[in-house]
Amino acid sequence: MSTKKTVLALKTGLWVAALSPAAWLTRGVVQGELGPNPIETLTRVTGLTALTLLLVTLTVTPFRRATGWNPVIKLRRPLGLFAFFYAVSHFSIWFVFDMVFNLGYMIEDIAERKYITIGMAAFLVLIPLAVTSTRGWIRRLGRKWATLHKGAYLATALAVVHYFWVVKADTRLPLLLGLCLAVLLMIRLPAFAPGRRSSRSVGKGVEDDVDAEGVRVG
């Protein structure tokens, strides 16, 4: 199979896999199969899916470096977009059903509950990554784009802590996800060394550079 066909097959599989949680939740809502607390199920699944996809997105570049298979970098953008989609869904469910569209309640909840505070911080960090994820922004920002998109590590770390504080009792899964993030950070430490520069030119080079740091979420 050619590289182009392989990438197309991987992208197709990615779309199917990434949309599966949304399809399952939609079916559950329509058929009333989300258990006694459907809002809690919607919130939990969308949040966990967003966090998982963020971690998978951060895995793309280390995987490319380990295998030398450059085309895998083409999966980073859709992975990041899906992560943001589920993050928006997670926030929207909380704002609509828990806060009933009340900004005052929302601000009060953010201020009073630390897991909400840190969860909102993670969401806010992701927003500029999504806004600047187009090719146009990549060209405009040049090397600053790569620096900005390192914020994906911060967003993921905040999301892990948010999840850890939410579950309270059984913390095995958030600890496991935190361990995965720690491993990814250790793998990427050389990439954060001062003075590290890509061999490509600014603008178009950053857009095409498979070694560009940060997570392309669009």
Image: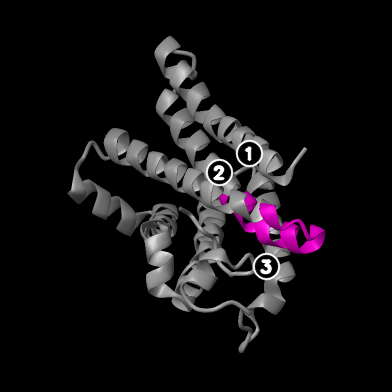
Q: Which residues are magenta?
A: 54-71
Q: Are the residues at dot 1 and dot 2 in contact (C-beta closer than 8 Å)?
A: no
Earlier residue among tags 3 and 1: 1
In the image, 65 versus 28, the foreground residue is: 65
Q: Mark 3 = which residue?
A: 185
Q: Which mark is residue 202?
A: none
Residue 167, numbered label: 2
Q: Main secondary structure of the magenta part?
A: helix
Which residue is drawn at the image coordinates 48% and 29% (left, top)? 22
Q: How many marks?
A: 3
Which color mode does the image show? one colour
Q: Is residue 143 above or below residue 160?
A: below
Expressed as whole percent of the image width and height from the top left, the position of residue 193 reads: 65, 84
Task: Assess disc 2: are there few (<14), some (14-19) or many (≥20) residues with their C-alpha within 10 Å of its C-alpha.
Answer: few
In the rendered image, residue 174, in percent from the top left (x then y), is placed at 63, 49
Residue at the outermost top position? 31
Q: Residues under labels 3 and 1: Cα distance? A: 29 Å
